[in-house]
């Protein structure tokens, strides 16, 4: 997927900054799981023009989450996140896979405990919905799986998030987080406001 490749390339370039950033602040990398939810837009679509209408779905399911951050001071930094559905789901007869990505400013307020660190994020990004042809069978070619890409829909988003890091060692942390995505013209689903819940495991390079 071009969007994911672009995101990962940018993340890789950012990690080249690790050496100099670690001398002044810290660098984090993390991976985990989450869930993104949105209601159906309530429409029924005749996707194939056969007179058979299929209801549009809700947005739900488990996502893979990954990201990283660079702190240029102990309390202020920036980072990027990517959330995507590992598998495809049904959308009115087609198959689809959603991908959310964002780039944020990050603030960690001062706390007495070094084991528990709160974190607040705010930034912008995008949402990419990719649609695929459904499985089909015929007497000539047999059955094919739903892996033929048809088209994609891209949307601008504004992102805000709040989480708490629990450091189980001086460098390894677990972070539950709640996010809100405001997605411009998210007409495929019922609301432009999309909540997300996630839990990740991460590693901090450099001092805290």
Image (spheres, rainbow, N blue to C red):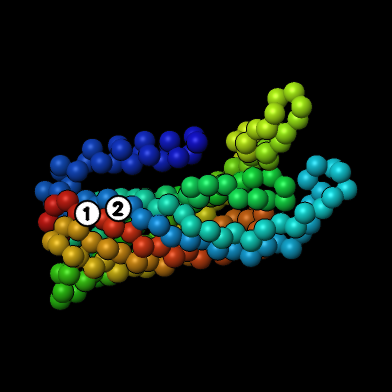
Q: For this rendering, which residue is in front, 49 or 74?
A: 49
Residue matched to label 1? 203
Residue matched to label 2? 30
User: Where's residue 120, x and y in %?
Assistant: 34, 66
Tell me the crowding category of disc 2: few under 14, some 14 to 19, or many 20 or more residues within 10 angstroms, Cα based.
many
Residue at image position (31%, 38%) is 12
Q: Check the image and report above or below for 2 versus 115.
A: above
Please say whether residue 57 is visible from this viewpoint.
Answer: yes
State left or right for residue 97 relative to residue 72.
right
User: Where's residue 193, x and y in %?
Assistant: 56, 65
As helix, strand or loop, the secondary structure at mark 2 comes to strand
State left or right for residue 15 relative to residue 123.
left
Residue at image position (64%, 45%) is 95
As helix, strand or loop, the secondary structure at mark 1 comes to strand
- Would you say the residues marked 2 and 1 are in contact, meaning their CB atoms lie under 8 Å apart? yes
Residue at image position (68%, 51%) is 91
Please say whether residue 192 is visible from this viewpoint.
Answer: no
User: Where's residue 189, x and y in %?
Assistant: 65, 59
**First in sequence: mark 2 vs mark 1:** 2
Alpha carbons under labels 2 and 1: distance apart: 6 Å
Residue 203 position by quadrant: bottom left
User: Where's residue 106, x and y in %?
Assistant: 31, 60
């Amino acid at each position: 997927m071009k969007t994911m490749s672009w995101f990962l390339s940018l993340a890789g370039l950012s990690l080249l900054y690790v050496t100099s950033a670690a001398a002044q602040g810290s660098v984090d990398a993390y991976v985990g799981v989450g869930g993104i939810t949105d209601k159906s837009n309530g429409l029924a679509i005749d996707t194939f023009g056969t007179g058979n209408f299929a209801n549009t779905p809700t947005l739900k399911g488990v996502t893979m989450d990954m990201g990283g951050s660079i702190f240029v001071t102990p309390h202020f930094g920036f980072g990027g996140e990517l959330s995507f559905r590992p598998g495809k789901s049904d959308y009115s007869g087609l198959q689809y896979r959603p991908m959310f990505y964002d780039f944020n400013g990050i603030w960690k307020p001062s706390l007495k405990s070094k084991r528990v660190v709160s974190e607040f994020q705010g930034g912008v990004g995008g949402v990419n919905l990719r649609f695929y042809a459904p499985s089909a069978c015929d007497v000539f070619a047999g059955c094919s799986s739903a892996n033929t890409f048809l088209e994609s829909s891209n949307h601008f988003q504004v992102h805000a998030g709040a989480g708490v890091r629990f450091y189980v060692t001086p460098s390894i942390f677990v972070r539950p987080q709640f996010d809100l995505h405001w997605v411009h013209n998210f007409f495929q689903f019922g609301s432009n406001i999309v909540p997300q819940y996630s839990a990740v495991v991460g590693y901090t390079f450099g001092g805290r």
